Amino acid sequence: MSDYRQALTAAQNYRAAAQAALGARLDHRPIDREQRAAHGFAWIATTVAALDATLDWYEAGSRQRADALVTHLAFAEGIAQLVGGLPMGQNEIFRPADLGLTDAAARLAEACAALLDSDQAAKRAELVALLADGQWPSETLHDADLDAIRDQYRRFTDAEILPHAHGWHLANALIPDATVAAMAELGTFGICIPEEFGGLGLGKLVMCIVTEELSRGWIGTGSLGTRSEIAGELIVLGGTEAQKADWLPRIASGEVLPTAVFTEPDVGSDLGSLQTRAKQNPDGDWVIDGAKSWITHAARSDLMTLLARTLPDAKGYAGLSMLLVPKPRGSEEVPFPATGMTGSEIEVLGYRGMREYALQFDAMHAPADALLGGEEGQGFKQLMRTFEGARIQTAARAVGVARRALELGLDYATTRKQFGQPIIHFPRVSDKLAMSLVDFVTARELSYAAARAKDGGKRCDIEAGMAKLLGARAAWSNADASLQIHGGNGYAMEYEISRVLCDARILNIFEGAAEIQAQVIARGLVGGRN
């Protein structure tokens, strides 16, 4: 057994001790009263899963020098955080004592003494020297088709997105129609839609690769596919045959751009409290009344997947239904031409290109066949079935943002000179780059592991939550480190890193905030206690 396998086994034993300790606590108190302990355990489990995925990547690859250094630093830092303190947030460090794990942490430290007692400075410096020389760690997926897809989307991103993205951001412009059309031509909007309905019929791993590369260029282009991913999966899994035949080919081709209309004012993750109502008229049409908020790409969309309360007497989730609501595409002059629907833009720091809106529905009509699957009261269940794919896709977006932040920091550090030399030669700069690279690789490999689990037909809400949780942290920390490398210039809007920092921040919030992900992971792993 390799030293890393031994370290992983020791970390897995520590994770098991943490799970047992949390389980014992939850025998006496509800999980909401033990959030710090529960979420700390979720971070322990996520860290161990990331080490596992990283070691699988290393052992399956060529084991080139950069790969070896990344793996070593990932284990050295990951084990050190498990023993000393895991960052759940900027000012929230989970310590072993928070869950009564002092003795278990001591056993882990003893088993991994060689990793913990070594100064890693030389390895960080060597890794950055390789990176500066253009020697990135391996990214092959050991499949010629998958590697070709990555290469195709990387070339597209380099040519069609990166040269323009910052200008689009500064202008708060929508992603140009020509870019959307080019993305559609590549098959972006039909990756996971079955071939019989005009899609590519591929899996979540391909979706990860595509999303990662597009998000490296701009999170807006990487996120545009999320709307088609959610709508497509909703219809594939829950739609009638007529709904599938009608909507899926048009979503796959890019003719129809969907938007997800779920969130409401004052209702974030608590979807059971949604108040937007939809009532069926005697003629069969649905009439929608209510308000929605934080709706991405609402104006330039053609289809709303709208979650509404159709059974007012049913409590909580039981009264919710999913409607497929067609709408005319808006323009800059008239963003919401549909009768019974109005909207106002929510100005945001980043995550531009599609725009965010608050929507009002005042007797807006939807056709009689709008009810997804023809079943009332199934909306929340139908939506839940898409959460795994959406969160994996969000993890991939985070990986792309994390890489772009690293690229910008590396480029600036090699060209910017201070005190007679490029600043990359200063250890506090190169250290940031080294650990940004490690975080990028571990987040990437964890997202791929979640995608493979989903493609294998496994329920993977825990794996998806872990990938999203770690990916969002990596994106933010990489962007923050890169901006610090830029110094004062990074705070100037003319520099791309200022946009990347703003884009990175949202990843810890949407598709389930970090705290929600940690709750899902902990609840799932301890067996669904209250």
Image (cartoon, rainbow, N blue to C red):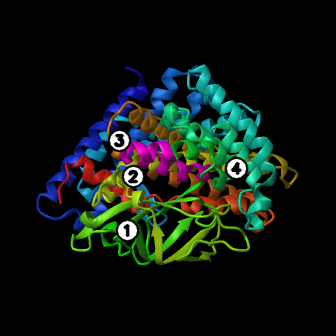
Measured as percent of width and height from the top left, residue 204 is found at 48, 37
Mark 2 is surrounded, within 10 Å at the Cα level, by few (under 14), some (14 to 19) or many (20 or more) other residues, namely some
Measured as percent of width and height from the top left, residue 55 is found at 46, 29
Would you place residue 99 above or below residue 57 in this image?
below
Tell me which label, 1 or 3, sits earlier in the chain: 1
Q: CA distance from mark 3 to mark 4?
A: 31 Å
Q: Is residue 88 left or right of residue 529?
A: right
Label 4 close to label 1 by CB (< 8 Å): no
Tell me which label, 4 or 1, sits earlier in the chain: 4
Circle 3: residue type:
Cys
In the rendered structure, which segment of residues is drawn in magenta? 222-246
At 48% from the left edge and 51% from the top edge, which residue is drawn? Answer: 231
Residue hosting label 4: 180
Mark 1 is surrounded, within 10 Å at the Cα level, by few (under 14), some (14 to 19) or many (20 or more) other residues, namely few
* Residue 460 circle label: 3
Q: Image quarter for residue 296? A: bottom right
In terms of secondary structure, where does tag 4 sit?
A: helix
Q: Nearer the viewer, mark 1 or mark 3?
A: 1
Q: Is residue 174 left or right of residue 340?
A: right
Circle 2: residue type:
Gly
Residue hosting label 1: 283
Count of marks overlaid on the render: 4
Residue hosting label 2: 84
Tell me which label, 3 or 4, sits earlier in the chain: 4
Tell me which label, 4 or 2, sits earlier in the chain: 2
At 73% from the left edge and 63% from the top edge, which residue is drawn? Answer: 169
